[in-house]
Image: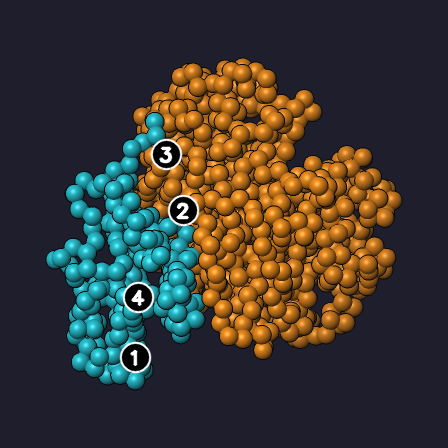
Chain colours: A cyan, B orange
Amino acid sequence: MKKRLYLELENCIGCRSCLAACTQCGGHEQRNRNYVYDVNPLVNRQTMPLMCLHCVNPACARSCPAQAIQIHETGAVLSALVEKCIGCQNCTIACPYGIPKFDTEQNLMYKCDLCIDRTKDGIPPMCESVCPSNTLQWLTDEEIEAKNQQFNLDNGKWVTSMPYLEGETNVRVNLPGILQGVTKLF
Amino acid sequence: MQEVNTKAPRDQFFKEIENVRHPNETLVKTHCSYCGMQCGMNLRVNTKTNQIIGVEPRYDWPVTVGKMCPKGVTAYQQTNHPDRILKPLIRDDASLKGTQKGFREATWEEAYDLIAKKFTELQQQYGKDALSVFSGVSMTNEKCYLTGKFARVALGTRYIDYNGRFCMSSAAGGFLRSFGVDRGSTLPWTDIHETDCLFIAGSNTAECHPTSMFRVWHVQERGGYLIVADPRETPIARRADVHLDLRPGTDLALANGILNLLIQAGYVDEDFVGNHTNGFEETKELVKQFTPEYTSQITGVAPEKIIRAAEIYGKAPNAVVMFARGVEQQHKGVDNVSAYTNMALVTGKIGRPKSGVATFTGQGNGQGGREHGQKSDLLPGYRKLTNPEHVREVCQVWGIPPEEMPQPGVSAYEMFELMEQKTIRGLYLLCSNPAVSAPNQNFIRRALKNLDFMVCADFYLSESAEFADVILPSVTWSEDEGTVTNLEGRIIKINKAQEPLGESKPDWQIQVELAERLGRGKYFSHLQTARDVADEFRLASKGGYADYYGATWDKIDKQDGVFWPCKDEADPGTPHMFLDKKFYHPDGKAKICALPYRPPAEEPDEEYPLRLTTGRVVYHYLSGNQTRRIQFLRDMCPEAYVEVHPETAAKYQIEHEEVVRLYTRRGEAEYKVKITEAIRKDTVFVPYHFGHDQSINLLTIDALDPMSRMPEFKACAAQIEKREKRAVQ
């Protein structure tokens, strides 16, 4: 069954294991391709990961004058093709989440490809596999829908794929607030 | 390399996933080299070069289901690291001690000859006890076992102790007193997410045992509660239902205060207390004075938080009390452990699934390593050197007459005192880096310099190795095999993924060969493989209460580990302790302990108004000798720093990222300031992973727990000063 990457931001403990694991995929040339941010470092220890959300109609690919950014049949938005990328960095500007990274030495963009060598065979990506806090999860649409029902956020919004961001994304995100809808056991 | 295909129980986090297999690669199932979680991992080995080249998740390990922290993900990079010591090193010029200078490469023959000569001379001149062994528990049970035997049979010295005194010994002492047995967790970790309340004291779980976190968060997602006691708002405390933000060093008052409320509110399990415990009445009397107001005065925690925490723990159908170094590294660490354990005993929330007490074991083999004879007063199987029957049992296995068994020695820190006094003149150090990890470093470094002869076995040139005359290259965890006992009390198997790099050798082999040089070969020469050591070790533990006899390597593979005690081949082991409500004291009852409050050994005053506490960051392990060399981890946390609350910073007129001088009565160091509201205003925090002049242990106090001999790393009095101010003076 098709699974998606799902981000439960409230779970993040800032360990950056996802960054370390990204380098271990085998196809990532030992460079990590995602981000973990300190949300308010002078105040508390809240952190959040930001992975490529793998937009259905990705701005990075749309902005690429060389068609270097391909979309895999699974929906994964791939890293730039070495032979096509002209190093213009349009994609890094176009992406609303600031995902694509740029290698100035190779004059080449590189980004998360959702560990395509794994996910094409149903194996979860490295970042999700190691995530100690279950901030990153690899779920079916049914499982994601169940979470949607369970966690009834008080802003009334299931924060993903909102039209005023970048349209539909393959990765689903739940912003902090996971515990708001939980009924306590006692 | 075994292909494990086991049908051990799986929980909801388990996923049936086939690992990616890259061409020309094989995967070796093993566990992480670092903390007590012992996360499962697969090491990727290139089948052409036979070298470790990476890591793959081990999805089928039931405790951690593929998850790893950043230390775990990068652990494999230790093995073929350019800093590895590949040949024995000898330093002829003793005046260079305390530096990295003056070492020359030597053959094993030359190194062994020199060690045998020096050790023999020292013992001839000053007696057997002139030598000492200082060891660690980040290594297999087999190595830990043999180190104890090596000290007592090959060297014949009483002076052996280990770094668990800086890590786990208070938990051991507290459990022994409360339960009569020291198994770090009374329940398997796969129970934790199913409990209704987690009460976690003095554990920065998200940074020190990150792969516990998916289970912790799940308790809250189910509607259960998380209570965290910590002076800092750590990543786990940030999401707690109740954060008990206590002053460092005041846990005993907090635990007594909560116990008092549990008793007053009628959460006592009268049946359990009456039939299975001693000491309730006396304890009830003692904790009466710990009203929420009085407890609040001592701990600095608001009374309503204490009341709420007690209410939640009391109401919870199932609850687990957990703690770690925060409560244990105090000069009353043993009392703290027993006091928090009291909560479970009084309410009867122990001896059944989903309820119990656990400590987050710090070192990889912190549990197993303390059970089999590296501690100054213990023999394999948790036998006691002071018990003649125990001594006889072990002597039978070792083949020595009981009168040759040395007497108990002294604890880790006290060994340094004896070095300073020249009672101890020689040291064989392995698997530890006390020149970073011990308290009161100015004293420790003086003591190390004072030695006539020091041998250090390590795979990197640690800060402690800088004091050695001879350095022996040992192997990393991935170049040897054996068992480790994780934080649950589950005995697991570490597998060999690569041949030893260069001329390095596993510690057990070094000890066998050294014993031969010292004329004690007949007690060691039969140990030619790690498995030989394992077989003798299982036999030596047989009949002790930490009985590993039935934990064969085959059974460990088949069952996904074996929980001790495991007495024979047919015994599957003991995941849950005390299900029969039988404790290990002679009368079968647990002890509820009446524990009067004592403040930290050093309280703040006018001169030193701040409380200094120390701890870890997620990117580094212990003294940092391993993790500081790994690029990713070093990039994430390259240096020590001091955490200061913004109001405190304003008072001292210091700013974020400014370098300040931090000092105590024992020492000083300079640190970059990290301003954060996630710490008490009266407290500052520095991580302890850094060496030389960055070591916070230059400042920490050597006040020891009277029972566990654990130093009080977690609380002392300190002062901050601006650097310019000092320059003016």
The kind of secondary structure element at disc 2 is helix
Kindly identify the amino acid type of the residue bearing the numbered disc 2.
Phe
Give the quarter of the image for residue B632.
Answer: bottom left
All told, the count of numbered labels is: 4
Q: Which mark is residue A81?
A: 1
Q: Chain of mark 3?
A: B
Residue B584, horizontal then vertical, whole percent: 65, 29
> In front: B101, or B382?
B382
The residue labelled by disc 3 is B224
The kind of secondary structure element at disc 3 is loop
Residue in the picture at 39% in, 62% down: A122
The kind of secondary structure element at disc 1 is loop
Could you give the CA–CA distance between mark 2 and mark 1, rounded to whole angstroms?
Answer: 36 Å
The residue labelled by disc 2 is B214
Could you give the CA–CA distance between mark 3 and mark 2, rounded to whole angstroms?
Answer: 14 Å
Q: Which mark is residue A74?
A: 4
Q: Chain of mark 4?
A: A
Q: Chain of mark 2?
A: B
Name the image quarter holding the N terminus of chain A.
Answer: bottom left
Kindly identify the amino acid type of the residue bearing the numbered disc 1.
Leu
